[in-house]
Image (cartoon, grey):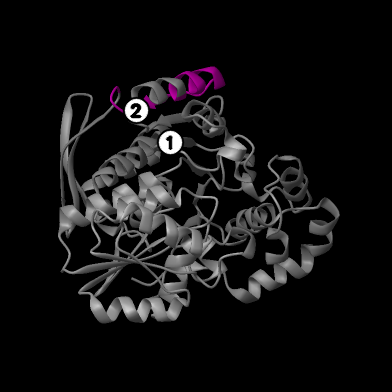
Amino acid sequence: MFARTGGVWRLGLERVSALLAAIGAPQRAYPVFHVAGTNGKGSTVATLDAMLRGAGLRVGRYTSPHLVNFAERIVVNGVPMSHDRIAAWLTEWEPLLTELGATFFEATTAMALWHFADEGVDVAVVEVGLGGRLDATNIVSPVAAGVTQIGFDHMEYLGGTLSEIAGEKAGIYKSGTAAVVGDTDPSIRELLRARAEASGAHPILVTGRDWEVHDIVVDAAGTSFSLTVGGTSRRLTTPLVGQFQAHNAAVALAMLRGAGGRWAEVEARAETLLKGVWLAGRFHRAEPWLFDVAHNADGAATVVANLLAVGMPQPLTAVVCVLRDKDWRGILLAVARAAERIVVTMAPTVPASRMWDLQEVDAWAASEGLPVQRIDDFSSALAQARAEAATVLVTGSFHTVGDAMERLQVHPVAR
């Protein structure tokens, strides 16, 4: 499977469509909630998964990338797909994967959708991998599709402006099914609403129009907020930490309301069901360690805002590794607002083609006057940071957070 990860992304639905048709169209066996966005989609998926499971349903959850183990991507009721089943599926379908030229993500998507059908799930929650319109997951016909906050990422594939990126992500909206617009920027929100309308989606639920999030309070226990829908307000709390976690939770709730029927009944139980939400690698505390993925500057700014709101033991050192095609300068500038010291390093699982240039990073940080220390060896970077800080933030790519969790034996699935 990992041999299929080389080279550029090959977007399009032709290969995954042929693959799924050959294995029996498993994606038609259960209803699907489909989530896209630059930031917040993982939290929205985690919220839907927890609430649906809390309501007694058998839930499949497909996410990417993984932190430590490939099987984290394909989970049913909190249990990852077993390695034996992964191997058996690949053994059976490898000839077809090769014949079709299926990519890593296309093969993984097909495997996940098959596994959910084979496990008899009541519903699946599916996270878009890249973009939306041409992403392999867009083969599903969801009961509700939601787009969270839009930011700059994967611009070589999705476009150089937020409007272009939003247009690609809006490609998951489908005729006759609920569309949820979660971006809080007025111009992007209107673009997404218009794309949803053009797709024939119904109903269309838009933040700031069909619901309001206000009075957000962030502390170490999570994020509480008031949600107003149709003139009625409720005070809700999600265990996820951060101002935008209120908005992410609201998107998940809007998707349930938009889907209607039994799904809306789940949404009505939000006060209770939100308590079960949990997401590994996002403000994930295992003192003195704090793990928080930040793959773009907006994500890093959110990490810093959460740190300042909660107040972690000081001094705080950040261990950072970012992929070379990301805005690592913006990420380091954001992290420097909260960290007394930043250790830049190289996570072991970063593909050679995406390794950042630590010499360039070190020189740039010095020119900016940032408190950066370069320690190339990952284990040494973790040990040095731990020796000198009361709190160690590990941030940057999924590779960085996952590699640290593996070395420190912090399990990404078990709470």
Please tell me the numbered disc located at residue 150: 1
Circle 1: element type? loop
Q: Is residue 36 above or below residue 287?
A: above
Left or right: 240 in relation to 61: left
Q: Residue at x 29, y 62 (%)?
A: 371
Point out the residue furthest to the front here. Answer: 367
The answer to whether marks 1 and 2 mark residues whose Cβ atoms lie closer than 8 Å is yes
Query: Real-space Cα distance between discs 1 and 2?
Result: 9 Å
Q: Identify the residue shown where x is 50% and y is 56%.
A: 60
Judge the density around disc 2: few (<14), some (14-19), many (≥20) Cα neighbours within 10 Å.
Answer: few
| Amino acid at pointer 1 | Ile
In the rendered structure, which amino acid carries the disc numbered 2? Asp
Q: Where is mark 2, residue-wise?
A: 185
207 drawn magenta:
yes
Q: Residue at x 53, y 38 (%)?
A: 142
Q: What secondary structure is marked by label 2? A: loop
| Image location of residue 254, percent across then percent down | 35, 35
Residue 89 in view: yes
Residue drawn at x 41%, y 31% as measured from the top left: 180
In this rendering, position of residue 25 left or right of residue 30? right
Residue 75, compared with residue 127, is above or below; it is below
User: Looking at this view, is 76 or 13 the one in front?
Assistant: 13
Q: Residues within 10 Å of mark 1 (few under 14, many from 20)?
A: many
Magenta residues span 192-209
Give whichever of discs 1 and 2 has the lower sequence position.
1
In x, y percent, where is residue 147?
A: 44, 36
Q: Nearer the viewer, residue 44 or 320?
A: 320
- In front of the other: 34 or 340: 340
Q: Where does the image place residue 268, in percent across and percent down from the top left? A: 27, 41
